[in-house]
Image (spheres, helix red, strand yellow):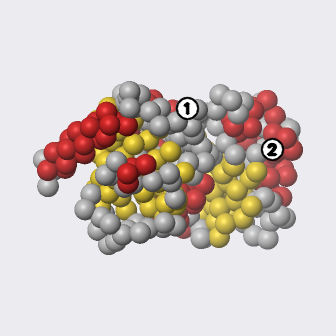
Amino acid sequence: MQVFRGFTPASHHVALTIGNFDGVHRGHQAMLARLVEAAEDLALPPTVLTFDPHPREFFAPGSAPPRLSTLRDKLEMFSALGVARVHIARFDAGLAGLTAPEFIDRVLVRSLGARWILVGEDFRFGRGRTGDLALLRASGRSFSVETMPTVTLGAQRISSTAIREALAKGDLERAAEMLGRPYAISGHVAHGEKLGRSLGFPTANVRLQHKPPLSGIFAVRVRGLSDEPRIGAASLGVRPTVKAGARPLLEVFIFDFEQAIYGRRIRVQFLHKLRDEERFADLDTLAQQIRADVASVREYFSTRN
C-alpha cells in the first residue's frame, strides 16, 4: 500500500472514499469493501483520503472526542482490507478554509484524480461544512458518486461515537460487536517507574499520545510478543494513588511472562472490565487490590478456555 502525505498533481485516476475512519469499525469496513469491489470493476486503484489531525481536534482541541485508533493502526487496517493508496491530508487552516467547490476542484479532481467517489449519506465538506451530497453530484463532470448506506447493529447505527459511548460505559462486548474485533490500544513498551515491580507485579508500560476512550482495570489479551497471544491484567488511567495530575498510562501485567520487552510494539485487546480506577490510602492497600484484580482476571480467563 502506498501512503502519501498531502497532495500533488494527479498522475493517474483513482476510485476514492473519504473519511476519518476512526476505529475502522464495521461500517467503515463495509465502505472499504465496496471501494475495493468497485475499484476492481473500474480497473482503478482503491484509494482513501483521510485526515490528521481529526477535524474536531483542529477546531476544538479541548473538547475533541478521544481517538479510537492511531494513524498507524488505521493504515494497517486499510492495508489488510485491500486499499492500494492512502492520502493523509493535514487538517489545518488552509484545508479548513477551502470552500466546497474549491475542495472538489483542487483536492478531488486536480490532486487525487478521482473518477469514482464513495461517501456516506451524511457526508459534508468544505468551509463551514456547506458542501453536501447534492453539490458533489452536481459537480461530478469527471467523476461519478455513490453513497454507502448506514450499517446498523440491531436498531443502532454503528458509528465511532456509539463505540466511544460503549467503551466509556465499560461495555466492551458491545464495542467489540460494532468494531468487529475487541477494542485495542497499540504502542511501544517504555520504561516506567518500576512501581509495579516493587509491588510484585511488573508491568509493560505503553505511553499514550492521546486521551483514551476508556479507563479502569481490565482483563486483556496481548499480541506482538510471540506467535500466540498472552493474557494479563491491565490498568488504564492516571494512577491516582501514585501521582497527582499524571497523564494517562497503560500498564499491563502479563501472566507467566518474564522477558525484557522494552521497545517492542504490542497490541493490547480489552476483553472485560473489572472496575473503575480508585485512589487507595497507601501502597499496601493498592497491592492488596492488585492481587485481588489479578485473581479475578485469572478466573475470567479460566472460564473461557
Label 1 element class: loop
What residue would you read off at disc 1? Answer: 244
55 vs 72: above or below: above
What residue would you read off at disc 2? Answer: 92
Residue 9 tag number: none
Q: Looking at the rendering, in which quadrant would you find the N terminus?
A: bottom right
Seen from the viewer's position, the closer of residues 163 and 49 is: 163
**Disc number lying in front (1 or 2):** 1
Residue 202 figure quarter: bottom left
Does residue 4 appear left or right of residue 96 in this picture? left
Does residue 185 appear left or right of residue 92 in this picture? left
Task: Name the amino acid, label 2.
Answer: Asp
Residue placed at 20% from the left, 44% from the top? 295
Label 2 element class: loop
Residue placed at 57% from the left, 40% from the top? 247
Mark toward the start of the polypeptide (1 vs 2): 2
Seen from the viewer's position, the closer of residues 5 and 131 is: 5
Residue 6, x across and y down, in percent: 78, 58
